[in-house]
Amino acid sequence: MPERTIYLDNAATTALDSRVLDTMLPYFTLEYGNASSIYTLGRHAMQAIDRSREEVAAILHCRPTEVAFVGCGSESDNLAIKGMAFASQKKGNHLITSAIEHHAVLHTCQYLDRFGFKTTYLPVDEYGCVDPEQVARAITDQTVLVSVMYANNEIGTIEPIAEIGRICRAKKIPFHIDAVQAAGALSLDVTELNVDLLSLSAHKFYGPKGMGILYVRQGMRILPQLQGGSQERGRRAGTENVAGIVGTAAALRLAYDDLPFVTPRVQALRDQLIKEILKIPGSQLSGHPTNRLPNNASFAFEGVEGESILLNLDLLGFAASTGSACTSGSVDPSHVLVALGLPPEWSHGSLRLTLGKNNTQEDVDAILAVLPGIIEKLRGLGL
Ligand code: PLP
């Protein structure tokens, strides 16, 4: 077994920041009150949640009342889309999204089919960009929501959110963005972005797993998807995960405090990865060459299986991804690479390397030392 994992899969999840853990610990032990209880212990919990909501609101440039804490990024996407669709049933039954969304969005839209909703899945160009003009053309008098991701989880392409937001605003159509991968790297200012609903997941920015955020612009009505108590201003029933909420807010604040130091370093390492890996014969970059997340280096290799690359890397102690949440044994290439128009001999050979603040030059040197040999070996074996 290799001595330590060289972790190059920060888009899948990130390590909890020890400073975040420190903020959370008291709420597992001493401060264990239920935030709905009126005695001192309960009020402490509620005060911690209120402070956390303010911290998040400061990053999003919104009101604290517009921030809801939920159980994960997937729940946030589900609540935004189902919540808006079901609250707007009298207005219309049409949704617009892109072909390269995360399954938390795509499968939610598909689920809504059975309730009479219809979704337009916008195509993307070869880099994975959504064309705002196509959004404008897809809007009908039945459209109740547009949902487009801020940055793609597989290929890192950043979408023209502010422009799409302007179009939606002009036509008075609510606009949701899945900002799960953008958090900690791009501005989350909801006013500049012209968005009405925004989803985040704490474990992508060194916060705890099982925590998400949904921003809901004041005046937007969404139908709650969990029935019970009136927590989160009636938007999400259930006793609040106080430690999780405190950790989520601390992680978001720290991610933006650290951004000016982390991003240039991570981006330089990513650029080196891209430059060197593209020297491998039969390789190409997936996603936009410049308009991409600073930590994302995604590739396609002709005539190789992505899973075989991963297994070989794993034996040497590297954690990486094909980019897609592949089911083992599945031979289907990712829906994102298919949407880019990649032919099967390329789309099967995907590799996503996503850097984080804990990666070093040595990590990059180490993978660059072994990857060309792995690709060559697999091609020789016909794998
Ligand atoms: N949206 C995007 C773009 C993601 O990358 C992910 C997670 O990979 C999610 C949503 C779901 O987040 P969670 O794992 O918190 O449910």
Image (spheres, grey):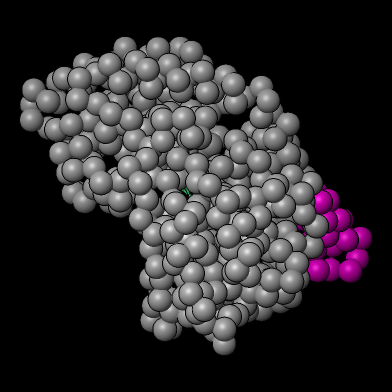
For image coordinates 74% across by 44% down, the residue present is 59
User: Looking at the image, is 57 positioned above or below residue 290?
Assistant: below
For image coordinates 73% across by 39% down, the residue present is 253
Span highlighted in magenta in the image: 30-55
Q: Quick one: 125 or 263, which is closer to the camera?
A: 125
For image coordinates 43% across by 79% down, the residue present is 117
Q: Is residue 263 visible?
A: yes
Q: Is residue 240 visible?
A: no
User: Looking at the image, is 246 positioned above or below residue 75?
Assistant: above
For image coordinates 67% across by 35% down, the residue present is 255
- Where does the image place residue 57, in percent across and percent down from the top left? 77, 51
User: Looking at the image, is 266 positioned above or below residue 222?
Assistant: above
On the rendered image, what quadrant is the N terminus found in? Answer: top left
- Where does the image place residue 268, in percent across and percent down from the top left? 51, 18
- Where does the image place residue 356, in percent across and percent down from the top left? 53, 28
- Where does the image place residue 367, in percent across and percent down from the top left? 35, 18
Majority secondary structure of magenta residues: helix
Q: Is residue 201 left or right of residue 325?
A: right
